[in-house]
Structure formats: structure tokens, C-alpha cells
């Protein structure tokens, strides 16, 4: 079966985009840790305002897992987006509003889906060790302080069965959102850490950064840039989006 085009788009060369990039200096007086401390409030306000209407599914389709007989999946930072077709779901998001919106979804079935408030950066994942087939980590690590990402990866490793998969999709380095933003945060841990007008954080990943982040615990099955060229018909301009799409497998011989 051919993979869905939208998951694996390659509309332009990432290296060509990279060659045109000029790094702007970070904004003075913005502190990553302070924004990180307020992240939960900022995301909760975001979800309260958008009330589930924020559905950029064109750019972030769920991984096609249901064909693979998946029994249990853990979703992180996944309050409002769709993977409700999977067999058993354990969904964590640290926004109370995001979880309430998901629970109110018509496809939410409490007999096979357990959605709860969980701060993946600071809480333990409340599942037995080695019990999960797949962890969907879709546009959530970018929202977490870079210094907390290693610990999240270690928690995923603990929760997954040997042979289990992390399905990762997130903003790629030089994505349009990064190139348009002037809100870069000076950080010792990451060059590509930005914040939005509403105070939420956004890191932009290179494939190398993803390989480095997961490499200690996982085998890299896939890890590539997806480049998506959208056309703004009104202005006649292109919008070049970059995402990193990766699958990481917990080795069979680890617990
Ligand atoms: C960019 S949104 C992506 C939402 C969804 N995964 C999607 O692709 O549509 C980031 C999500 O991560 C959640 N989030 C951010 N930091 C988190 C954390 N430390 N623990 C749990 N969820 C977090 C936010 O509440 C928000 O719902």
C-alpha cells in the first residue's frame, strides 16, 4: 500500500530552503523558563478560546495505525485531534479544556478511551511499564521546553512494549511559521526555540535533532522532512511548510 501523500509530501528540497535562511538574533529579555512555567495556562486559554474548532488536519493527519492491529496507544498533547478510531487509547494533555473537548467528541467512547489531564514534562505517565503498542507524539514536543524533552522520551520508552513505536510528527526547521516569526528565544539548549503571540512555545526540529533526541533509547525506522507547498491564491504566494515525520521503535531486547 502506498503511504498517504499528505504524510510524506516532498514538494521542494529542504536543503534549498535551508540555504536561504539567515538567523535573526534572539529577542532581548525573554526568558524560556518563565514561558515554560506558564505554558499550561497559555494552552488552556488557547483551547478554551478555540473550543475544538482548531483542526489543521490537512497538515497533520494521524498516522495510519488501525490497519496494523494496534491494541493500545498513548497520545500525548493530543487533547483535541483525532485518532479515535484506534482500539484502546490513553490520552494525556495538560489542558483541562482540551481533555473536556475530547471527552465531549461524538466519537469518544469511554469503554476504550481514557483521556486525562497529564503534564508529560512533569508527571509520570500513569500506565503499567511496557504496556503500550504505539505512542502518538504529534505536535507536542515542540511545545515543551527543550531541557525537558529527554525526560519525556525516557517516559515513552518505559511505557512502550518492546518493539513498540513512537509515531512522531512536528514542526521542521525552517518551517514557514519559524521564518515568519521574530520571536526567537535565546536558549543554551536550542537555536530554534520560538514563542507565539499567546505565549505558547514552539521548537522547530531538524531530523538530526530528532535522531539525537530519541537515539539513546530507540531505533530510527523513519525520520524525514516533509515539505508541503501551499498556494495562497489571493496573494499568489507560496507557503512552504516543513514537518518532521518519524517512527522510532523500542528495541525488542529492552524492557
Ligand atoms: C500544538 S498543540 C497540538 C495538539 C494536537 N496534538 C494536534 O496535533 O492537533 C500542542 C498540544 O500539546 C499540549 N501540551 C503542551 N505541553 C504539554 C505538556 N507538558 N504535557 C501535556 N500536554 C502538553 C497542549 O495543551 C496542546 O494541546
Image (cartoon, helix red, strand yellow):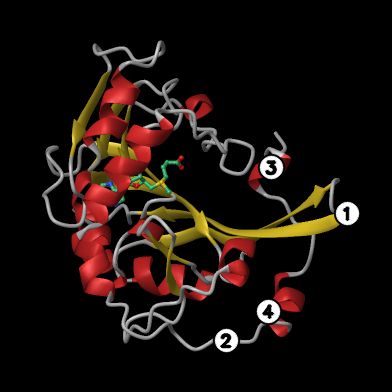
Q: Secondary structure at mark 3?
A: helix
In depth, the one of 252 and 69 nearer the eye is 69
Q: Distance from label 1 to label 2 (Cα)?
A: 26 Å
The residue positioned 14% from the left and 44% from the top of the image is 129
Residue 236, which numbered label?
1
Choose mark 4 or mark 2, whichever is in front: 2
Mark closest to the chain's N terminus, 2 or 3: 3
Circles 4, 2 touching at the beta carbon (< 8 Å):
no
Mark closest to the chain's N terminus, 4 or 3: 3
Mark closest to the chain's N terminus, 4 or 2: 4
Circles 2, 3 touching at the beta carbon (< 8 Å):
no
State whether label 1 is within 8 Å of ligand 1.
Answer: no
Q: Secondary structure at mark 2?
A: loop
The residue positioned 53% from the left and 72% from the top of the image is 206
In depth, the one of 75 and 80 nearer the eye is 80
Q: Measured along the vertical axis of the image, is residue 73 above or below residue 249?
A: above
Query: Label 2: which residue?
Result: 23
Circles 4, 3 touching at the beta carbon (< 8 Å):
no
Query: Label 3: which residue?
Result: 6
Q: Distance from label 4 to label 2 (Cα)?
A: 11 Å
Is residue 126 in view from this perspective? yes
Q: Measured along the vertical axis of the image, is residue 167 above or below residue 32?
A: above
The residue positioned 43% from the left and 59% from the top of the image is 197
Residue 46 quadrant: top left
Circles 4, 1 touching at the beta carbon (< 8 Å):
no
From the image, which quarter does the N terminus lie in?
top right
Q: Distance from label 2 to label 3 (Cα)?
A: 29 Å
Mark closest to the chain's N terminus, 1 or 2: 2
Query: Label 4: which residue?
Result: 18
Q: Residues within 10 Å of mark 4 (few under 14, many from 20)?
A: few
Amino acid at each position: 500500500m502506498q503511504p498517504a501523500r499528505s504524510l510524506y509530501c516532498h514538494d521542494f528540497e529542504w536543503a534549498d530552503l535551508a540555504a536561504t535562511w539567515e538567523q535573526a538574533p534572539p529577542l532581548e529579555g525573554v526568558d524560556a523558563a518563565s514561558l515554560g512555567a506558564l505554558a499550561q495556562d497559555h494552552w488552556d486559554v488557547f483551547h478554551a478560546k478555540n473550543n475544538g474548532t482548531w483542526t489543521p488536519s490537512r497538515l497533520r493527519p494521524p498516522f495510519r495505525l488501525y490497519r496494523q492491529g494496534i491494541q493500545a496507544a498513548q497520545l500525548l498533547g493530543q487533547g483535541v485531534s483525532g485518532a479515535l478510531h484506534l482500539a484502546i487509547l490513553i490520552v494525556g494533555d495538560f489542558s483541562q479544556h482540551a481533555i473536556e473537548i475530547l471527552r465531549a467528541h461524538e466519537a469518544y467512547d469511554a469503554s476504550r478511551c481514557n483521556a486525562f489531564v497529564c503534564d508529560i514534562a512533569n508527571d509520570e505517565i500513569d500506565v503499567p511499564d511496557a504496556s503500550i503498542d504505539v505512542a502518538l507524539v504529534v505536535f507536542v514536543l515542540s511545545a515543551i521546553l527543550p531541557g525537558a524533552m529527554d525526560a519525556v522520551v525516557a517516559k515513552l520508552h518505559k511505557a512502550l512494549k518492546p518493539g513498540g513505536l513512537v509515531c512522531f510528527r512536528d514542526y521542521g526547521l525552517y518551517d514557514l511559521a519559524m521564518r515568519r516569526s521574530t520571536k526567537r528565544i535565546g536558549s543554551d539548549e536550542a537555536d530554534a526555540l520560538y514563542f507565539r503571540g499567546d505565549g505558547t512555545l514552539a521548537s522547530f526540529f531538524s531530523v538530526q535533532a530528532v535522531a539525537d533526541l530519541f537515539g539513546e533509547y530507540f531505533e530510527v525506522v523513519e525520520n524525514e522532512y516533509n515539505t508541503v507547498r501551499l498556494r495562497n491564491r489571493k496573494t499568489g504566494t507560496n507557503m512552504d511548510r516543513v514537518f518532521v515525520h518519524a517512527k522510532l521503535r523500542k528495541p525488542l531486547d529492552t524492557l
